[in-house]
Image (tube, rainbow, N blue to C red):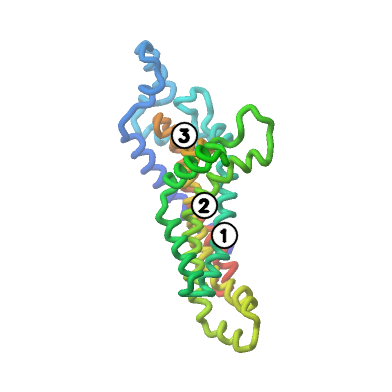
Amino acid sequence: MLSYIIRRTLMAIPLLFGISILSFGIIHMAPGDPTALMMDPNIKPEDMEAYKEKYGLNDPPHIQYLKWVGNMLQGDFGQSLIRQGTDVSYLIMERLPNTLFLMGVSTLLAVLISIPFGILSARKPYTLTDYSVTFTSFLGLATPNFWLGLVLIMFLSVQFGWFPTGGIATLNEPFSVWDRIHHLILPAFVLATADMAALTRYTRTSMLEVLKQDYIRTARAKGFREQKVVYKHGLRNGLIPVITIFGLMLPSFFAGTVIVEKIFNWPGIGLLFVDAAFQRDYPIIMAVTVITAVLTVIGNLLADILYAVFDPRIEY
C-alpha cells in the first residue's frame, strides 16, 4: 500500500504542473488588468511602471510563470496585487479554517442523512417510501446551490428572521458557540444539498444490488434478523462504490464553497477566490487553483485507500 501511495503521489506531480500551466495561461489571457482596478487614475506613469516592475507584471508570461513556480515550490505564493504588501499565504491561512469548518459540517451532514435514507430506500424498493426518497433526491440534484441559497435567505432570513442573512458571526457581539452555529446552518445545508442527494442515490443503487446477492439470501435463509442481514452482511459491500464516489466528491465540496460563501458572505477561501477573480488578483487565483487541484488528487487517493480497506479482495 505504501508503494502504491508513493507511486500515485509521484504521478500527481506532472498532473499538478499541467493544471498550473493551463490555469496560468487562461488567467493571463482573460481580459482586464489588475493595475486598472487598483490604481488611482491620477497616478503618475512612472509610478505605475514602478509598480508593474515590482510585481513582475512587465515580464513575459513564461518568465512570470517560472518565477511563480519557483516561489511556490518554496512555499511562497507571492503577494496580493490588490492588497499590496499582504502575503497570499497569510490570506489563505486566515480564511482556510472557515472553509474547512463549513466543508466539514456539510460533509458530515451529507453522510449522516444520505446513507440512512439510501439504505431505507433500498430496503423498501418501489414503495411510497422509496418514491418519496427518490423524488427528494432528484429535487436536490436539480436545485442549483445559488438559487436555493437565495430562496432560503429571502424566506427564512428576510421574511421570518429565523436565521442571519450572512456572515460567520454577529457583528460587535462577544463570541458565542450558538451564534456560530446559527450562522452556519443555512450555508452548510445549501452546500450539502446536491451531494446529499447524489450520495442517497448511489447508496440506494449499491445496496439494492447487494441485497439481491446469494450470500444475503443465504443469511436470510439461516434465520438472521433483517437488521443484521442488512447492516452486518450487506452494508460493508454496499458502501464500497459509495466510498469511491464520496472520495471524488470531496473536491466538489471545496469548489461548491465558492458559490455558497459568496451568497452567504462567509469569509472563507471561496469568497476570497471570487473577489480575486473580479479584481484580477492573479497570485490569489493561482494559489486557490493549486490548492483545489491538490485536494482533488488527495480525494482520489483517499478513495482508493478506503476502497482497499473496505474490500480485502483489493490489493495494490
Query: Which one is in front, 272 or 25?
Result: 272
Q: Please tell me whether residue 102 is drawn above or below residue 61 in the rendered image.
A: below
Residue at the image position 53 percent from the left and 44 percent from the top? 187
Image coords of residue 30 (percent x, y): 32, 35
Mark drawn on residue 201: none
Write down the residue under mark 1.
113
What amino acid is labelled 1 in the image? Ile
Write down the residue under mark 2.
192
Q: In the figure, is residue 191 to the left or right of 180?
A: left
Q: In the figure, is residue 161 to the left or right of 30?
A: right
Q: Is residue 30 visible?
A: yes
Q: Using a 10 Å C-alpha cutoff, classify the residue at mark 2 as few (fewer than 14 neighbours), some (14 to 19) or many (20 or more).
A: many
Write down the residue under mark 3.
284
**Residue at the front extreme?**
160
Q: In the figure, is residue 69 to the left or right of 310?
A: left
| Label 2: element kind | helix
Q: Earlier in the sequence, mark 2 or mark 1?
A: 1
Q: Earlier in the sequence, mark 1 or mark 3?
A: 1
| Label 3: element kind | helix
